[in-house]
Image (cartoon, rainbow, N blue to C red):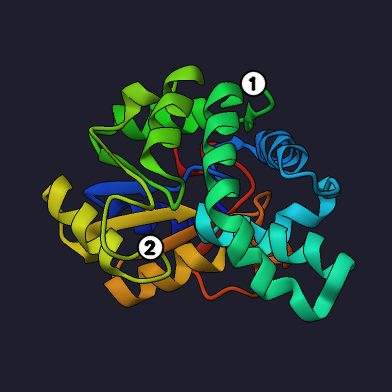
């Protein structure tokens, strides 16, 4: 058995519960982001943003995403006034984005290969599971339902479920409480430095997928306990 597989097996043998991220970990939602954001920009009379620009902005919550998109688009029009105009546009942008995202939620996204098989194996092993995402809860729950993933999780928490978002450790600590598990025996599975930093600060082991977003940066340089190309490797 390869060393990395042995390490994963050893880690799972010390695990009572698993916390799984959503965007970039279970579901490729970049198409949803691209569609909703460009519908929002159209409503505001602003130019569209290229899909490849969005990846580096995803992962820190919808408020951060919208401000990043607005600042990027407005900077091309008037760099000196971009930050001021971003805040001026934000309330209208937020309302428009929420409306459009809920309309298309899941329509332009797909579950990554191996996710269903991996979650099924973890569930069959008797592990308690929660989904913890920085996505608003009103977006996360319908997406999990639409993609047939909701039944794997006893708890689902979004970026607005607690006072702070990942990479702050608070969401992980609160999720561990809800699962009734100790952080040291609760595995965080994510795709980015946000997940890893939150897990380290909370005292949870962390494994990252290699195919996610990670703010557009290579995930291999992130401090984690392991990396997997598919959730089936956690089986």
Task: Name the residue rendered at 57%, 56% in the picture.
Answer: 90
Asked if the residue at tag 1 contacts the one at tag 2, i.e. Cβ–Cβ closer than 8 Å, the answer is no
Which residue is tagged 1? 107
Is residue 114 depicted above or below 215 in this figure?
above
Q: Nearer the viewer, residue 231 or 86?
A: 86
Q: Residue at x 59, y 38 (%)?
A: 96
- The residue to which callout 2 is attached is 165
- Which element is circle 1 on? loop
Q: Position of residue 128 (x, y in %)?
A: 23, 39
Q: Position of residue 195 (x, y in %)?
A: 46, 62
Quarter of image, res 4:
bottom right
On screen, residue 77 versus residue 69, left or right, reads right
- Residue 90, relative to residue 141: is it above or below? below
Task: Please tell me the numbered disc located at residue 43.
Answer: none
Which is more toward the observer, 93 or 136? 93
Q: Is the C terminus in the top left, top right, bottom left or bottom right quadrant?
A: top left
Q: Is residue 201 visible?
A: yes
Quarter holding residue 111: top right
Determine if residue 225 is in view.
Answer: no
104 versus 46 height, above or below: above
Distance in Å between CA atoms under marks 2 and 1: 26 Å
Q: Nearer the viewer, residue 157 or 197?
A: 157
- Which numbered disc flags the more N-terminal residue, 2 or 1? 1
Q: Could you say where residue 69 lies in the image, as x and y percent from the top left?
A: 71, 57
Q: Residues within 10 Å of mark 1 (few under 14, many from 20)?
A: some
């Amino acid at each position: 058995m390869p060393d990395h597989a042995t390490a994963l097996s050893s880690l799972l043998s010390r695990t009572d519960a698993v916390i799984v991220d959503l965007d970039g970990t279970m579901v490729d939602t970049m198409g949803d982001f691209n569609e909703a954001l460009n519908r929002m920009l159209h409503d505001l009379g602003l130019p569209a943003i290229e899909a490849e620009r969005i990846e580096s902005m995803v992962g820190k919550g919808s408020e951060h995403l919208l401000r990043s998109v607005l600042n990027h688009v407005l900077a091309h029009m008037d760099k000196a006034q971009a930050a001021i105009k971003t805040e001026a546009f934000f309330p209208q942008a937020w309302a428009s984005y929420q409306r459009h995202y809920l309309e298309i939620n899941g329509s332009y996204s797909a579950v990554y290969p191996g996710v269903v098989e991996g979650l099924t194996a973890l569930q069959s092993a008797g592990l308690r599971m929660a989904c913890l995402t920085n996505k608003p809860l009103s977006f996360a729950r319908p997406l999990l339902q639409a993609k047939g993933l909701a039944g794997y999780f006893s708890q689902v928490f979004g970026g607005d479920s607690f006072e702070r978002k990942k990479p702050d450790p608070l969401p992980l600590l609160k999720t561990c409480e809800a699962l009734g598990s100790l952080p040291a025996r609760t595995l965080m599975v994510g795709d980015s430095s946000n997940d890893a930093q939150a897990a380290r600060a909370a005292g949870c082991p962390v494994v990252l997928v290699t195919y996610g977003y990670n703010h557009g940066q290579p995930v291999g340089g992130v401090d984690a306990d392991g990396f997997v190309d598919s959730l089936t490797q956690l089986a």
